[in-house]
Each structure stands twice: as C-alpha cells, then as structure tokens.
C-alpha cells in the first residue's frame, strides 16, 4: 500500500460510474465520468419532454421548473441570489459572453495571469484588438509553495502588476497547470480599492465540484464554471455567477430569445429589451435534460460529504501521491509542498515526452494527461480515487522509469 493512505476506499459515486469499472482514472480536471443515475435522469427527462410534447403548452411549465430549480441550486452553491446566476454551456461561454459586454474604453488594460486557459486568453486577445486595449501579464506560475506563501505571493504580484488603467483582471480560482488555489476574495478586495475598481473574471473550471466556491464566486464579477469536470455532470452545461455591477453595467453580446424580456415579438422601438438579471447573458435553446443530469451528479457528490470534507479527502490523496512521486528517481513535482487541491503535476527526466508517458500509461488502463505550459504530466485525485488507483500509477511510473 502507498504510504499515507489511511482513508476508506470506495464510494457510492465511484461505484455508479461505469467508466471507473476498468480504469485507473486521473483525468477529472479534463472531464469527470458520468454516473449511471445521472444518465438515467437525463434519459427520463428527455422521455418526459416527449410525452408532454416538445413544443406544447403542457411542456413549458416542466421546462420552466427545470430551469428554475437548477438555477437556484447552482446559485446556492455559489453563494449568490438566483438573479445573479446565468446558465451556460461551458466555462468559455460563461467567461466570454459577459466579458465582451463590459464597458471598456480604448487604452484600458487587461491583466491576465500566466496560468489561464488558452480559450479565455484568445478571447481577451481578440477583445483587446477590437477595442484597442492593452494586455499585461500577472505572473503566478512560479508560485510553488504552501497556501500561505502562495496567497502572499499572488497578492504581491497583483499589486506590482496593476496599472492605473487596469480595467479587468483575469485569474483562475484554481490554476489548471500547477494546481495552486488563488485567494480570490482577497484579490477582489484589492481591486475594489483600485482607482478603476477593476472587474475580476475568474475561470472556475477546476474549482467547482472540487473545493468550496461560495466565497470566491460571490466576490468575483464573473465566476464561470462547468458541471462536467470535478462534479461528474454531463458535458454541455455550466453556469456563471455575476456581480450586481456586471448586471447593471454589462450588456449582452451574443443575443437570443432567452436574453429578452418579451421573447414573443421583435420590438424595434424597445428601449430596454433585455432581462435586467443574469438571463440577459443566456442566449437561446439549450438541452433541458442535462439539467436533471447535473442535479443528480451534485446529489451523489454531496453524499460523499460537505465541500470541506470532500476537499480534505482529496488533499489526503493528492498529498499521498505527491509524497511518493518524490521517491521516484528522475521525477520532480511542480510544487515543493503538498498540493492544496487534487491536481498533482510532475515532470519525469529522460527521453520520453509527456505525451509518450500518457500513451504508455494508457496501455495499462491508467489515464492521466500531459500539459504544454509548463511541459509536465498531471494526475487528478478525486473523492472517487482509491489507494489502489494511486498504487497502480506509482508502480507503473517506478517500473517504467528504470
């Protein structure tokens, strides 16, 4: 057995995921497996819609209830009122649609961390080109210590990088490459005191379903997340928590009938055609049955304990993996302290590339991923991860590194 693993293995969530029956799975940061009860909930919802008729007066109350129940559930998890929670299809749309509606002026600065996902970075680059904005970089990739040192380092870097004209800061809650947690509430406080009161956009792809998010989501201006990673929900459904300031100052960008107060007619003379709440950033027809699937996955996740309890379990597993990786010749972990989350990134010296390692491990039913910046391997420990899973990964790494 791996040293340091004292928790009980196995869980109702793990047992309900067919994808985990024959795999050692460490790719929750890419996509979590869908539990059978969640798949059944999706199927049952689809069947109910067809029984009612997909476009009848009987189906609208059902669809309205599904939207409202899910919106309230996600808003509660994010510590905000339902009027501040917009439903989205993924993290990128949750980030980009409100971002492009913010009030920018030519010459404003965008401060983007050096650990942001390429999709969000590309959107910011194109926004800057169109609006004649300036892009600055917030360095946080080098922060490799414990939580206290990381928090202090991130805040110090932010104070140094802020420009008098900084209008927006883009910083993930949980960095997808190093696994460090950023002090989002304290970042928000600092920005509120800034001369421009910079907006704060937070990519929450790796945080939702893994760590408690309410405090950070309530503090950010745009806090975009997905249900298909750590929450093990279906792909194609997420949400974004928006600040009151974004609701009052932001304008919709990609517009459809769900954005409108009155979807029944096109009024060319309407002075305020859009919803005043988060729905102004929703667009048009979405896949309603996914709502039931995500709620089912959230129910199963909550049966594993509170958000704080789940994070403690995840940390115990990532710490065990991190500790054992130190003992493998030629292996270096990105962090020099046990991870604050379930993301464990590491590098292996030798001729094999990270991609080679992913393919080699995959042949043995062990699934991790490679990252390009920095070039490394990343293994994600989840509440579903067992001691046996971790032992199998370590055993293969030890044997293949000789």
Image (cartoon, rainbow, N blue to C red):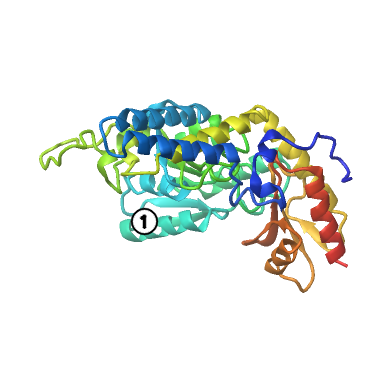
User: At 37% from the left edge and 51% from the top edge, which residue is drawn?
Assistant: 108
Instruction: State whether residue 111 is above or below residue 215.
Output: below
Is 317 or 290 nearer to us in this picture? 290
The reply, left or right, for residue 63 in relation to residue 203 is left
User: At 58% from the left edge and 30% from the top edge, which residue is drawn?
Assistant: 299
Instruction: State whether residue 291 is above or below residue 345.
Output: above
Q: Position of residue 221 (x, y in %)?
A: 43, 37
Outermost residue toward the left in this view: 269
Q: Position of residue 398 (x, y in %)?
A: 86, 60
Is 230 or 18 nearer to us in this picture? 18
In which image quadrant can residue 182 be found? top right
In which image quadrant can residue 274 be found? top left
The reply, left or right, for residue 17 in relation to residue 352 is left
Q: Position of residue 7 (x, y in %)?
A: 81, 34
Outermost residue toward the front in this view: 51
Instruction: State whether residue 258 is above or below residue 353.
Output: above
The reply, left or right, for residue 124 in relation to residue 353 is left
Dot 1, crowdedness within 10 Å: few (<14), some or many (≥20)? Answer: some
User: At 70% from the left edge and 66% from the top edge, which residue is drawn?
Assistant: 359
Residue to which mark 1 is pinned: 127
Q: Secondary structure at mark 1?
A: helix
Give the position of the C terminus as an image quadrant: bottom right
Q: Position of residue 214 (x, y in %)?
A: 54, 30
Is 149 or 218 nearer to us in this picture? 218
């Amino acid at each position: 057995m791996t040293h340091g693993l004292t928790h009980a293995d196995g869980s109702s969530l793990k047992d309900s995921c067919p994808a985990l029956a024959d795999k050692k799975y460490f790719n929750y940061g890419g996509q979590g497996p869908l539990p059978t009860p969640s798949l059944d909930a999706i199927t049952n919802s689809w069947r109910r819609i067809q029984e009612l008729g997909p476009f009848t007066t009987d189906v609208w109350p059902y669809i309205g209830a599904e939207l409202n129940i899910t919106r309230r559930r996600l808003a509660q998890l994010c510590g905000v009122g339902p009027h501040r929670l917009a439903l989205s299809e993924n993290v990128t749309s949750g980030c980009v649609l409100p971002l492009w509606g913010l009030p920018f002026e030519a010459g404003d600065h965008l401060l983007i961390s050096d650990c942001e996902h390429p999709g969000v970075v590309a959107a910011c680059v194109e926004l800057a080109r169109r609006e004649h904005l300036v892009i600055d970089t917030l360095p946080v990739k080098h922060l490799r210590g414990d939580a206290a040192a990381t928090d202090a380092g991130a805040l110090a870097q932010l104070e140094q990088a802020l420009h008098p004209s900084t209008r927006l800061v883009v910083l993930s809650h949980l960095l997808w490459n190093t696994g460090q947690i950023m002090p989002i509430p304290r970042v928000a406080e600092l920005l509120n005191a800034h001369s421009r009161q910079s907006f704060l956009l937070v990519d929450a792809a790796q945080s939702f379903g893994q760590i408690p998010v309410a405090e950070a989501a309530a503090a950010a201006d745009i806090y975009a997340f997905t249900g298909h990673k750590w929450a093990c929900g279906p792909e194609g459904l997420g949400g974004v928590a928006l600040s009151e300031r974004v609701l009052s100052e932001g304008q919709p960008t990609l517009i459809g009938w769900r954005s409108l107060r009155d979807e029944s007619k096109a009024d060319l003379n309407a002075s305020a055609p859009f919803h005043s709440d988060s729905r102004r950033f929703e667009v048009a027809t979405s896949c309603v049955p996914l709502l039931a699937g995500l709620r089912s996955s959230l129910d199963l996740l909550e049966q594993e304990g509170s958000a704080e309890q789940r994070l403690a379990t995840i940390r115990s597993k990532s710490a065990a993996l991190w500790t054992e990786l130190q003992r493998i010749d030629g292996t270096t972990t990105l962090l020099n302290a046990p991870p604050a989350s379930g993301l464990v990134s590491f590098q292996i010296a030798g001729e094999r590339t990270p991609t080679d390692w992913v393919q080699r491990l995959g042949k043995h039913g062990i699934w991790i991923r490679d990252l390009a910046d920095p070039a490394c391997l990343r293994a994600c420990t989840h509440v579903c991860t067992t001691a046996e899973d971790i032992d199998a990964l370590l055993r293969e790494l030890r044997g293949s590194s000789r």
